Image (cartoon, grey):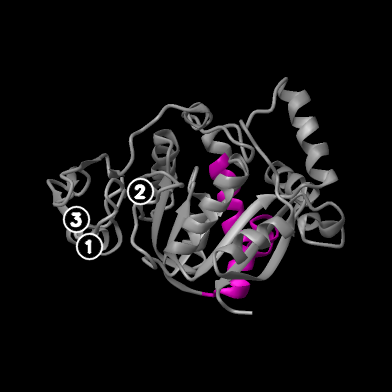
Amino acid sequence: MNLAPASEEIKESIISKIRCANCRRSNLVVELVTDFEGRISCPYCNATYPIRRGILFLADPKASDWDRIYETPIRSNLARTLNDHIKLIEKALREERSLLSYFILAHLAKKTIARSRDSIEIGCGSGTYSLILKKLKIASTSYLVDRSLNALLNAQRIFSIFDEKAIYVLGDALNLPFKENAFDLAFSGGLIEHFKYKEQQRIISEHCRLANRILCQVPTNSIPYWIQRMGLTLLNKRWPFGYERPLSQSTLKKYFKNSGFVVKSFMYHDPLTAFLFRASIRHPWIGGLASKHFLNRLLKHEVVVYAQKGMV
């Protein structure tokens, strides 16, 4: 499995970007036994972090609802099995127009960023956003961070299937183990809404600490969102995605402003486009209906924003 680049490349990249999660100092020592096994140690506080199965354990793994959601086969709001999820990605990669209609984070990235030297996806889940950005050649080197070990294992499988490589980190979104401005681009999709207000601001601040260009996708506090949530709750007999607090666009702008960033652009996602795109996997004739149109704004239930540091 293509879990990560060759040992020396991993080592150089890790040393240049990470810091100790305990004392927050850099210049850590990386020892690789193989491409996928080794350890990281801090010479200041003597903390040690294992590297196992190609994953950097820079936080203590904690069992959570997300580990159960990402048990194999993968189960998420995109697909109920790993094979279905792979088919969804394959369809998107074959049809760029459909891809950009469905994966609006990738659409906004292509429109505003075009290309980045390296990227970090915070709360990566299955890693699909990072994979799409790599396939579109928007991102070169990709770091995937999640607190769920099962999520990272699934991301490894998906990247391997599509013959792509990444560096996988088990880390805490509230205390990311990376140096300031370590990346060209930091982004997340479906992360911030799972935290309370003070933690939401803190996570945005962590995004902004790591890069000067940020992409962030969240559900909006809107009627379409609450209708969809009610439907999923009735269908599953409970809300399947744990604690979730949608954000208004003004709240998101405030969070970025508090971190010295300005929101420069945004796009909406809507449940109709999402439904038509997923339906077109089994019924290709539906595909043409999945492109963006005026209903995109009327039915908006998610927004993705692009923010830059200190630029009005």
Which quarter of the picture shows residue 62?
A: top left
State yes or no: discs 1 and 2 in contact (Cβ < 8 Å).
no
Going from the N terminus, do you reach mark 1 or mark 2 first? 1
Looking at the rendered structure, the kind of residue marked 2 is Tyr
Q: Secondary structure at mark 2?
A: strand
- Report the Cα–Cα distance between label 1 and label 3: 16 Å
Counting from the top left corner in percent of width and height, residue 45 is at 18, 46
26 to the left or right of 143: left
Counting from the top left corner in percent of width and height, residue 68 is at 50, 26
Q: Range of the magenta residues?
A: 85-114
304 to the left or right of 138: right
Q: Which residue is mark 3?
A: 28
Q: Quadrant of the C terminus?
A: bottom right
Which quarter of the picture shows residue 119?
A: bottom left
14 to the left or right of 157: left
Counting from the top left corner in percent of width and height, residue 166 is at 36, 54
Q: Which residue is mark 2?
A: 168
- Verify whether residue 98 appears in magenta: yes
- Verify whether residue 203 appears in magenta: no
* Farthest-out residue, top: 237
State yes or no: discs 3 and 2 in contact (Cβ < 8 Å).
no
The residue at 54%/56% (across/down) is 204
Q: Which residue is mark 1?
A: 9
Counting from the top left corner in percent of width and height, residue 114 is at 54, 75
Q: Quadrant of the N terminus?
A: top left
Looking at the rendered structure, the kind of residue marked 1 is Glu
Looking at the rendered structure, the kind of residue marked 3 is Leu
Going from the N terminus, do you reach mark 3 or mark 2 first? 3
In the image, 262 versus 153, the foreground residue is 262
Circle 2 Cα neighbour tier, 10 Å, few/some/many (<14 / 14–19 / ≥20) = many
Identify the mark at residue 122; answer none if there is no mark.
none
Which dot, 1 or 3, sits closer to the camera? Answer: 3
